[in-house]
Structure formats: C-alpha cells, structure tokens
Image (tube, helix red, strand yellow):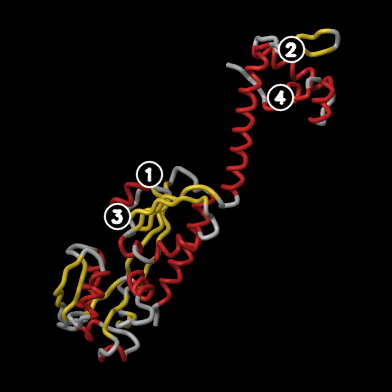
C-alpha cells in the first residue's frame, strides 16, 4: 500500500507549475534539497520516473502530466474538506437529526431549531415526530443524534438526561377555579377530565393523587397526547392535568387570544422527559450546541408554571 504524503504532492504540484526545483522551493518556503528529496521519494513510492534530468533541467514525463491532474484533484478535495471541517467546527455547516415526542413537535422544537439555525444557512435538519418508544429505538441504533422523549427504561445504548416536569391544570379563563393559586384533586372531584390512554404513567400518577385525596375521578376523554385536550377545555367540556410542554406550546400559538389559564397542580404529578443521545458515539459540536439550548429550554419549562 502506498504511503504518499501531502507534502510530496504539494512539492510535485509546484514543480509541475513552475518547471524547476528551485522555484518550487521558493514557493513552498523549503530548501532545494528538501524539495528534491520529496520528488525522489515520490517517484520511488510510485515506482515511476516523473521527471528526466537533462543538463540541469527537469523534463516532464507523460506519466507526470497524468499524475499532475490527479494531484490537483486530491489537493483540492483536501482543501475543500478542510474548509468544510472549519465550517462544522464553527457550527456553520453540518446536519442535525432530531426525533421528538408529540408534545414538543408542533411549536417547541421547531421554534428552537429555527432560532438555532437562523444564522447557519448550510446546516440541514431532519426533525421527526414519533412516539417515545420509537424515538428510543432510533437513538439507540444511532439513526438520530438527539431525541426528546418520555424517560425510557435503563438502556446501555442510550445517554439520558432527565427532567421531571410538574404537570399543570388547564381551565378556561373565566372558570371559577382560575382564581385559585393552585389546583388540588378536591377542586376537580367528579369533574370531567381529558386524560392520556390507559396505563400511561401520567394517568396512573393522576389517579393516585385523586385516590389519596378521596376525590372522585371522572375521565371523560381519553387521548394519545394533551394537545387536543386543550381544545376540549376551551369548549368548556372538561379540565385536563397536562404536561408543561403542552401548556408552553399553547401560549406559543395563542399568545394574543389565549382562552385558557394553567395553574400548578398539587400534589405534583410529574411527567418524566429525557434528552436522549447515542451512548457509544460522541455528539458532534453542532449537536452538542443544540442540546445545550434544548437543556436550557427544558429547565425553563419546568419552572414556568410553578406556584
């Protein structure tokens, strides 16, 4: 296997361009013996005589003309790769592959991505919304760089950073309960609720809170996620105890004409959410920079609706 060096190729290119060892040495800021040695070692490595020495002059062989074209292409590709890596290092180029749960997919994640890449026109993004179980599989198999999902069971293939988000109670602005500082199960006893599907940890924790308070639990609507629940609450059909990501998203698109208020719910019903990364592959600088922004946003959301 050949062991060609970049310096050999650069020396060869300059000799071809200038037609002399001395002029190539001047361009490269090297000594003549050093350039001569690199040309000789290049010829030895290739097993081809590239130049014929005639009366102190270098005469290019046909093989040299062919190899010059190859050398130009190789060095240009290396220069392009170096420029690309500098762009990547400065977070100006690259690709982000993000998988996110429904609660963050419509407003939170697109907004964060938009802010992040606004000054990075060469950065490309794949952003897919899936159920948390699918996100776990994608991140563990390294199909995606970043995942935001409900906290998974322990998995050696996942690097997990967890946030416990305290759920809040959504109600119409003109509801009598909107005057309260926080909401308890007794306030919602026997009132119609929009809840997540059976066996979801959020539903189980909510049922447990009502049972401990000896308050009637009335799940009228069963849903896959909380976003449609807010429409039902706006229509006055129910209340919902939802995650703060959904509440924060609501204000993103209903900031001006918000019909709902969100109050802390006690005792705390947490939704455990995690930023996921492949455990056995370090994050790119681009991914690490976006994760830092995502982490800060999750911390903000966790505190946004606290009493």
Kindly state the secondary structure of the residue where label 2 is placed.
Answer: strand
Badge 4 density bin: few <14, some 14–19, many ≥20, Cα 10 Å? many
Give left or right: position of 200 versus 180: left
Q: Secondary structure at mark 4?
A: helix
Q: What is the distance, in whole Å, between disc 2 and disc 1 at their CAs? A: 50 Å
- Return the residue at label 4: 13
Among numbered discs 1 and 4, the one appearing first in the sequence? 4
Q: Which residue is mark 2?
A: 51
Q: Quadrant of residue 274?
A: bottom left
Q: Position of residue 222 (x, y in %)?
A: 17, 68
The dot on residue 130 is: 3
Q: In which quadrant of the rendered view does residue 40 lie?
A: top right
Q: Which residue is mark 1?
A: 143
Of pointers 1 and 3, the one earlier in the residue sequence? 3
* Left or right, 58 with reference to 95: right
Q: Disc 3 or 2, which lies upstream in sequence?
A: 2
């Amino acid at each position: 296997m050949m062991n060609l060096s970049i310096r050999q190729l650069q020396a060869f290119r300059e000799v071809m361009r200038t037609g002399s060892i001395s002029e190539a040495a001047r361009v490269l800021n090297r000594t003549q013996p050093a350039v001569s040695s690199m040309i000789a070692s290049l010829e030895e490595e290739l097993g081809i005589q590239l130049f014929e020495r005639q009366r102190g002059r270098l005469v290019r062989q046909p093989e040299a003309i062919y190899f010059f074209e190859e050398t130009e292409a190789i060095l240009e590709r290396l220069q392009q790769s170096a420029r690309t890596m500098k762009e990547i290092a400065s977070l100006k180029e690259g690709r982000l592959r993000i998988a996110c749960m429904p609660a963050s997919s419509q407003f939170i994640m697109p907004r964060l991505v938009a802010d992040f890449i606004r000054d990075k026109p060469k950065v490309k993004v794949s952003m897919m919304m899936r159920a948390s179980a699918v996100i776990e599989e994608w991140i563990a198999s390294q199909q995606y760089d970043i995942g935001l999902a409900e906290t998974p069971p322990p998995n050696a293939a996942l690097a997990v950073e967890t946030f416990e988000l305290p759920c809040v109670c959504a109600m119409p602005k003109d509801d009598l309960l909107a005057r309260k500082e926080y909401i308890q199960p007794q306030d919602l006893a026997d009132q119609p609720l929009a809840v997540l599907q059976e066996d979801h940890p959020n539903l189980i924790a909510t049922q447990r809170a009502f049972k401990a308070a000896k308050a009637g639990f009335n799940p009228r609507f069963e849903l896959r996620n909380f976003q449609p629940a807010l429409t039902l609450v706006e229509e006055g059909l129910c209340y919902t105890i939802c995650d703060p990501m959904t509440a924060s998203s609501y204000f993103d698109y209903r900031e001006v004409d918000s019909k709902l208020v969100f109050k802390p719910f006690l005792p705390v019903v947490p939704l455990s959410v995690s930023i996921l990364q492949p455990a056995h592959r370090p994050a790119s600088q681009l991914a690490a920079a976006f994760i830092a922004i995502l982490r800060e946003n999750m911390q903000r959301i966790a505190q946004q609706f606290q009493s």
